[in-house]
Amino acid sequence: MSTLGRGRHVKTYELDDGTFITIKDMQDKGFSKNTAYCRLQRTRDPIKVFASPLNNWQLDDGTVWTVDSLAARLECSRSTAWKRLHTSTDPEVVFADVGKSTNGKIASVRAATSLANSRMYGDPEGFWKIFNNI
C-alpha cells in the first residue's frame, strides 16, 4: 500500500502479468470508481480488468452487434436492444419489428380496445349509473 497523506492509504493491486495498478489509475483510463473496484476484486487478469465496457454479440448469421448499434438500426430504446440481444441469437427474432407508439397513442388495436372497454368509453351513461349507485 502506498500513502496518500494524512495517514490515508491507497491499495495497490498486482495483476497476473506483474504490473501494479490502483483504482485511481483505472479512473484515469476512463473507468468509473465502482467498475474499477469490482473488476479488481473479481479478477487479476489484465484482459478482463481492462476489457471494454461495450459487449459485442454475434448472431447466427455471423454479424456482430452492440446494444447501441442495434438500437440505432431498429430505432428503439437501448433496453429493447439489450433484451433482444440477451434473449436470442436468431436474426429474425432480434430484427423483428418493434411495436411503436405514435404521438403517445397506443398502436395496438387489441390494447386500445381493452383500454376502452375497461374504462367504459363506449357506455358513458353506464359510468354515471355506477358512480351514482343507480
Image (cartoon, helix red, strand yellow):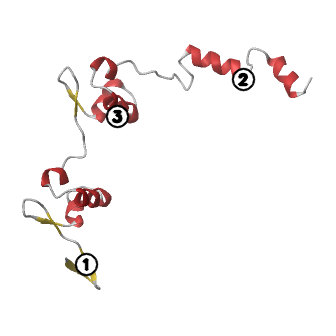
Foreground pick, 125 / 17:
17
Residue at far right of view: 134
Q: Residue at x 35, y 31 (%)?
A: 81
Dividing the picture into quadrants, the one containing residue 22 is bottom left
The residue indicated by pointer 1 is: 9
Identify the amino acid type marked 3.
Trp
Q: Is residue 83 above or below residue 22?
A: above
Q: In the image, residue 59 lies at what x, y percent?
A: 23, 25
Q: Are marks 3 and 1 in contact (CB under 8 Å)?
A: no
Identify the amino acid type marked 2.
Arg
Q: In the image, residue 80 lies at what x, y percent?
A: 39, 31
Q: Secondary structure at mark 1?
A: strand
Foreground pick, 30 / 115:
115
Chain-order first, disc 2 or disc 1: 1
Identify the amino acid type marked 1.
His
Q: Residue at x 92, y 22 (%)?
A: 134
Q: Is residue 8 left or right of residue 63?
A: right
The residue indicated by pointer 2 is: 119
Q: Residue at x 24, y 42 (%)?
A: 54
Q: Secondary structure at mark 2?
A: loop
Chain-order first, disc 3 or disc 2: 3
The residue indicated by pointer 3 is: 82
Q: Is residue 92 above or below residue 55?
A: above
- Gap in angstroms between the C-alphas marked 2 and 1: 63 Å
- Gap in angstroms between the C-alphas marked 3 and 1: 39 Å
